[in-house]
Image (cartoon, rainbow, N blue to C red):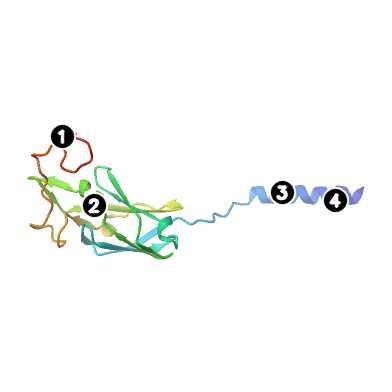
Amino acid sequence: MRRLITICLLALSAVALCAAAPIASAATKPKITRVTPMRISIGNLLTIRGHGFKSKAKRNTVIFRAGNGRSAFAKPSRASSRKLVVRVPAAVARLLTVKNSKQRPTRLKLRVLAGKFSDYTNRRLSPVVTGTGDGDGGGNAVKVCKDDSDHDNDLLPNDL
């Protein structure tokens, strides 16, 4: 009987210790430490370095966020636990600033979802995205057509 009581007390104390100990998270929070290039056109490859990424490309998602809060999402074409390579999607075009019916180069914040969300990048790590073209934001930028009621084909009128 004494032995049974001792075993029960040991089991209860072990359960109490396990409940008090912090639970170690299997997934660490991703962190972006470097982005290259810092000026990029839509359709080109962007390299994101850091840690906490998933090794399989499909398990990571890169989020591009404009200053007004709108976002676009992309899956990387290549991935490792420390590096992601993603093509800037055409959906990012709707995030760019429009002035005089032309898209202007716009600084976009980045965030990675790899099991957990990373923090948004600060200004130093946020690339400037230009319209389709050579990356200089010059004459090759996408012209926004005001003649069409739905120039970006998102099934919403332009004035919305």
Total numbered circles: 4
Comes first in the chain, label 1 or label 4: 4
Instruction: Please provide percent x and percent y for residue 111.
Output: 35, 53
Distance from Cα at disc 1 to Cα at disc 4: 75 Å
Q: Which residue is mark 1?
A: 159
Q: Which residue is mark 4?
A: 6
Distance from Cα at disc 4 to Cα at disc 3: 14 Å
Mark 1 touches mark 3? (CB < 8 Å):
no
Q: Which residue is mark 3?
A: 15
Crowd tier of the residue under label 2, counting other residues whose Cα lies within 10 Å: few below 14, some 14–19, many 20 or above: some
Mark 3: secondary structure: helix
The C terminus - image quarter: top left
Comes first in the chain, label 1 or label 3: 3
Q: Which tag is nearer the camera, tag 4 or tag 2?
A: 2
Residue plotted at (71% across, 48% down): 15
Q: Which tag is nearer the camera, tag 3 or tag 2?
A: 2
Instruction: Please provide percent x and percent y for residue 24.
Output: 57, 55
Mark 1: secondary structure: loop
Distance from Cα at disc 3 to Cα at disc 2: 53 Å
Q: Which residue is mark 2?
A: 90
Mark 4 touches mark 3? (CB < 8 Å):
no
Comes first in the chain, label 2 or label 1: 2
Q: Amino acid at mark 1?
A: Asp
